[in-house]
Image (spheres, rainbow, N blue to C red):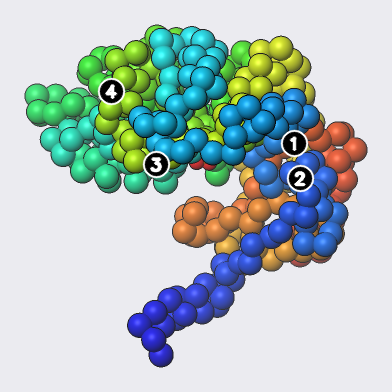
């Protein structure tokens, strides 16, 4: 019984509640059909929305960058860690998003946490959707600003909180996910932007699941809703639809210069290796040159959801490729996910504490790279296993 034995106790509790997991191992690239744990499965688990994670153009760009710039950068961005390709990527993203400037972080997580914590102080106020991502929550906590939570997707509630803060000192930051990762629903941006403008709040959105998915060529929710110039801080990720790794913040030149000077993950953690930066850059070229990939993603999304509904599944409030299938408790979600895997379908089981108790689900994410044949087989498997387990009535 060492001093860490309490960890063992907690792990045993996870085992009892059915939430303990083992990491699944991909034995090759992330593809619509992947080799995982010795089995070939249809992959509905990844965030690889556009199928770029294993795209030849990205891989070639990475290899070429390794030959020219090497494997690593030698330091953080403010020392030797800024190469020509880092600046080129930031200029490319800023142009794509139609903003003055952009800063790239090591991940979407550090982009959110580093930005919120550096632009606010303990005297300030954050008005945050109750289902915002963990990286936003951590950024809010790190800033030590006062946190006010509004009901999920309730712009009127956010406005009410802002109204109540009128005359209270400190800056106000209104923040939401663009697309929510668990339900696939879209944040009420027009209403939130209006509230932010009315009360003089900073408007910030996290487009992790909307980058490469919503808007023209996948420009995100600001473009989708026609709100250019009205959102002060736009965060995106390079780790999902872009297919590689990283996060970015787009906004005014002053915002970006400020983050260069003050964002702690930017200042105190080494920059992306050349391979990552160059592959991200190639992905943005593809988004501009081949918008049909985004169209295929949406066509597949409509096809998959329609087939699920035809089989009696409730696809909930999702408006995006994220498609949850609700089953109740965590134990059932994990059992359903495990049974599906045995039948050749990979879809993640998600339960408490990631989602509320009783709201456990498996989450299917459609990509542009799936064929209709993959999706037909997936729906057939989902329905057959659900009937066998009593999730769908027979
Ligand atoms: C995935 C995700 C992130 C983190 O992005 P990474 O690049 O994987 O670190 C941030 N916000 C939201 C809403 C996400 O879904």
Quick one: label 3, few (<14), some, or many (20+) residues within 10 Å? some
Q: Which residue is mark 2?
A: 29
On screen, 338 above or below 32? below
Quick one: label 4, few (<14), some, or many (20+) residues within 10 Å? some
The answer to whether the residue labelled 1 contacts the one labelled 2, judged by CB atoms less than 8 Å apart, is: yes
Q: Which residue is mark 3?
A: 269
Q: Position of residue 372 (x, y in %)?
A: 87, 34
Dot placed on the residue nearer the N-terminal end, 3 or 4:
4
Q: Which residue is mark 4?
A: 258
Q: Position of residue 254 (x, y in %)?
A: 29, 15
Q: Position of residue 4 (x, y in %)?
A: 39, 79
Secondary structure under tag 1 reads loop
In this orientation, which residue lies closer to the viewer: 218 or 352? 218
Q: Picture quarter containing residue 370?
A: top right
Quick one: label 2, few (<14), some, or many (20+) residues within 10 Å? few
In this orientation, which residue lies closer to the viewer: 176 or 325? 176
On screen, 264 above or below 197? below
Residue 222: give its label: none
The answer to whether the residue labelled 2 contacts the one labelled 3, judged by CB atoms less than 8 Å apart, is: no
Dot placed on the residue nearer the N-terminal end, 1 or 2:
2
Residue located at (86% from left, 41% from top): 374
The answer to whether the residue labelled 3 contacts the one labelled 1, judged by CB atoms less than 8 Å apart, is: no
Q: Which residue is mark 1?
A: 54
């Amino acid at each position: 019984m060492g001093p860490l034995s309490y960890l063992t106790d907690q792990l045993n509790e996870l085992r009892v509640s059915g939430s303990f997991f083992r990491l699944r191992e991909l034995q090759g690239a992330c593809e619509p059909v992947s080799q995982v744990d010795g089995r070939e499965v249809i992959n509905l688990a990844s965030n690889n929305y556009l199928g770029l994670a294993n795209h030849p153009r990205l891989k070639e760009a990475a290899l070429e960058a390794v030959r020219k710039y090497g494997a690593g950068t030698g330091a953080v961005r403010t020392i030797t860690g800024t190469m020509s390709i880092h600046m080129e990527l930031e200029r490319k993203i800023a142009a794509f998003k139609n903003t003055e400037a952009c800063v790239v972080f090591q991940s979407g997580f550090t982009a959110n946490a580093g930005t919120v914590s550096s632009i606010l102080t303990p005297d300030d106020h954050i008005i945050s959707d109750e289902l915002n991502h963990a990286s936003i929550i951590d950024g809010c906590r790190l800033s030590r600003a006062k946190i006010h939570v509004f009901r999920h997707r309730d712009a009127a509630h956010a406005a009410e909180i802002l109204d109540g803060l009128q005359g209270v000192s400190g800056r106000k930051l209104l923040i939401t996910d663009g697309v929510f990762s668990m339900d696939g629903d879209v944040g009420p941006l027009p209403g939130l932007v209006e509230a932010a403008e009315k009360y003089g709040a900073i408007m910030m959105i996290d487009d992790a699941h909307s980058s490469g998915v919503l808007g023209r060529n996948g420009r995100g929710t600001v473009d989708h809703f026609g709100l250019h110039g009205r959102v002060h801080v736009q965060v995106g990720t390079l780790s999902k639809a872009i297919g590689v790794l990283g996060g970015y913040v787009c906004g005014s030149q002053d915002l970006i210069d400020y983050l260069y000077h003050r964002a702690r993950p930017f200042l105190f953690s080494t920059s992306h290796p050349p391979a990552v930066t160059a592959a991200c850059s190639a992905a943005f070229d593809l988004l501009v040159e081949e918008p049909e990939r985004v169209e295929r993603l949406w066509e597949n999304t409509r096809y998959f959801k329609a087939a699920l509904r035809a089989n009696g599944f409730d696809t909930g409030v999702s408006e995006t490729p994220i498609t949850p299938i609700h089953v109740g408790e965590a134990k059932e979600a994990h059992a359903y996910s495990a049974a599906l895997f045995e039948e050749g379908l990979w879809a993640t089981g998600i339960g408490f504490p990631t989602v509320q108790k009783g709201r456990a689900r498996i989450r299917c994410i459609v990509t542009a790279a799936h064929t209709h044949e993959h999706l037909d087989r997936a729906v057939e498997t989902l329905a057959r296993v659900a009937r066998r387990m009593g999730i769908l009535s027979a």
